[in-house]
Image (spheres, helix red, strand yellow):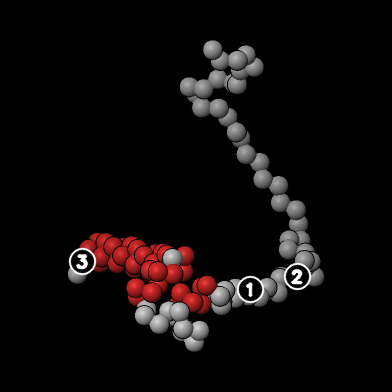
Amino acid sequence: MPPSLSRKFFKEARKGAAALSLLTFLAVQAMAAFPALHALVHGDSTDPSHQCAVTLFLHGQVHASSAAVEAAPGAPAFAAEPLLATTVFVSTDVQLLPSRGPPSILPVI
């Protein structure tokens, strides 16, 4: 498979997976909002021991993954030795291009 075709295939596959995930999530939310729709899918939806994704959403038993971030130790704020023994000065000659003049104080109309 050529690289451009492969990239296009994976891009389309990613879009399809995202659309399927969204459709599933919205279907579960719709069944949670409308018990009659849930009863069409599960005949025993009124049973107290019934467990499915819809009942988990209804009872708030959905747990999101934790996003614990550990801070890496930072670099020391000071250096024990100077970086350069001598000071280096750099001079540059900044000039305007030949077709450009100095900036004007007057507003451009």
The residue that mark 3 highlights is: 2
Horizontal side of 74 relative to 31 (left or right) equals: right
- The three-letter amino acid code for the residue at tag 2 is Pro
Cα–Cα gap, marks 2 and 1? 21 Å
Looking at this view, is 17 or 10 the one in front?
17
Identity of the amino acid at label 3? Pro
Q: Residues within 10 Å of mark 1 (few under 14, many from 20)?
A: few
Q: Is 43 rendered above or below residue 8?
A: below
Residue linked to disc 1? 69
Q: Earlier in the sequence, mark 2 or mark 3?
A: 3
**Number of numbered tags placed on the structure image:** 3
Is 54 or 104 nearer to us in this picture?
54
- Label 2 neighbour load within 10 Å: few <14, some 14-19, many 20+: few
Check disc 2 and report its element: helix, strand or loop: loop
Is 42 above or below relative to 109?
Answer: below
Locate residue 75 relative to residue 41 in the image: left or right.
Answer: right
Identify the residue at the far left of this view. 1
Question: Which residue carries the number 2 mark?
Answer: 76
Give how far apart the Cα atoms at labels 3 and 1 are.
39 Å
Q: Nearer the viewer, mark 2 or mark 1?
A: 1
Q: Tell me if residue 22 can be seen.
A: yes
Dot placed on the residue nearer the N-terminal end, 2 or 1: 1
Q: Picture coordinates of residue 60 (x, y %)?
A: 57, 74
* Separation of marks 2 and 3 at Cα, in angstroms: 48 Å
Q: Looking at the image, which residue is at 66% across and 41% down?
A: 91
At mark 3, the secondary structure is loop
